[in-house]
Amino acid sequence: MSSWLDSTVARNRRRGVLVDTNFLLLLFQGWLRSDLIGAGRTSGTTESDFEYAAQILHQFHTLITTPHILTEVSNLSKQLRGFDVEDFNEEFARRVPQWLEVHVEAKSAIGADGFEYFSLPDTAFKIVAMDRRPLVLSWDGPLARQLDEAGVDVVTLGRLRTAMDSD
C-alpha cells in the first residue's frame, strides 16, 4: 500500500471502517464467487479491486454498517445473474453478526442536513460517518466529496486503485 493509504488506515484503525453499499456488494461478490465481481452495481470493478478492499478491511477490528446499507446489499445481490440466494444468505449470516451495526432512524435521517440531495441509506451513512469519524470506503462521488470536505477520511475506488498500484 502507499504511504498515504497506510497512514490513513493507521489514523482510523481504532475508530473502524464504514463501508458503503457498492464496496460491501463487491466484497460479498468476492467472498462468494469471484466471477460475480463486476456484475450489476459493481460493473467496472475487478478482482484486484476486491483484493484491495479486503486487504484494507483485514486491518480493522471494527467494520461499521447500517441496517439501510445491509438492506441495499441484500436486495442488490439478489439481482445478480448466476447468484445463489442460499449461499449469499449463509455468508451474510456468518459475517454480519461480527460487525457494528449502527441504527439511524429514518425520521432522523429525513430531518438531517443534505437529505434533499441523498437517499435515506446515504443520509444515514453520512450521519454515522460524521458522528463516528471512521475511515469511509465509498465510491459514491457526491457523498464521498461531502465527507472528505467535512474532514472524514474517505477512500474511493479511484483512490484505492491509485494507492495500491503505487507499490
Image (cartoon, rainbow, N blue to C red):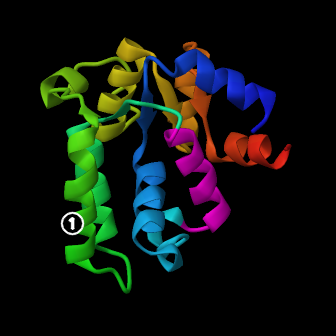
Residue 106 in sight: yes
Q: Amino acid at mark 1?
A: Glu
Residue 152 lies in quadrant? top right
From the top left corner, tell me how far across and down residue 22 is, in percent. 46, 53
User: Which of the two residues, 88 or 105, is positioned nearer the viewer here?
Assistant: 88
From the top left corner, tell me how far across and down residue 79 is, in percent. 32, 74
Number of numbered discs present?
A: 1
Magenta highlight: main SS: helix
Q: Is residue 53 left or right of residue 22?
A: right
User: Which of the two residues, 16 or 151, is positioned nearer the viewer here?
Assistant: 16
SS at mark 1 in the image: helix
Residue 81 lies in quadrant? bottom left
From the top left corner, tell me how far across and down residue 27 is, in percent. 46, 57
Is 63 magenta? The answer is: no
> Quadrant location of the C terminus?
top right
Residue 46 in sight: no
Farthest residue, direction right: 166
Is 53 magenta? The answer is: yes
Q: Is residue 107 left or right of residue 156?
A: left
Magenta-highlighted residues: 43-58
Which residue corresponds to the image point at 23% horizontal and 55% vertical from the top-left? Answer: 94
Which residue corresponds to the image point at 65% horizontal and 23% vertical from the top-left? Answer: 8
> Quadrant location of the N terminus?
top right
Which residue corresponds to the image point at 55% horizontal and 70% vertical from the top-left? Answer: 38
From the top left corner, tell me how far across and down residue 90 is, in percent. 21, 66
Please determine whether, in this image, residue 117 is positioned above or below residue 127.
below
User: Which of the two residues, 71 or 111, is positioned nearer the viewer here?
Assistant: 71
Tag 1 residue = 90
Please determine whether, in this image, residue 148 is positioned above or below residue 140.
above
Farthest residue, direction bottom: 82
Which residue corresponds to the image point at 75% horizontal and 46% vertical from the top-left? Answer: 164
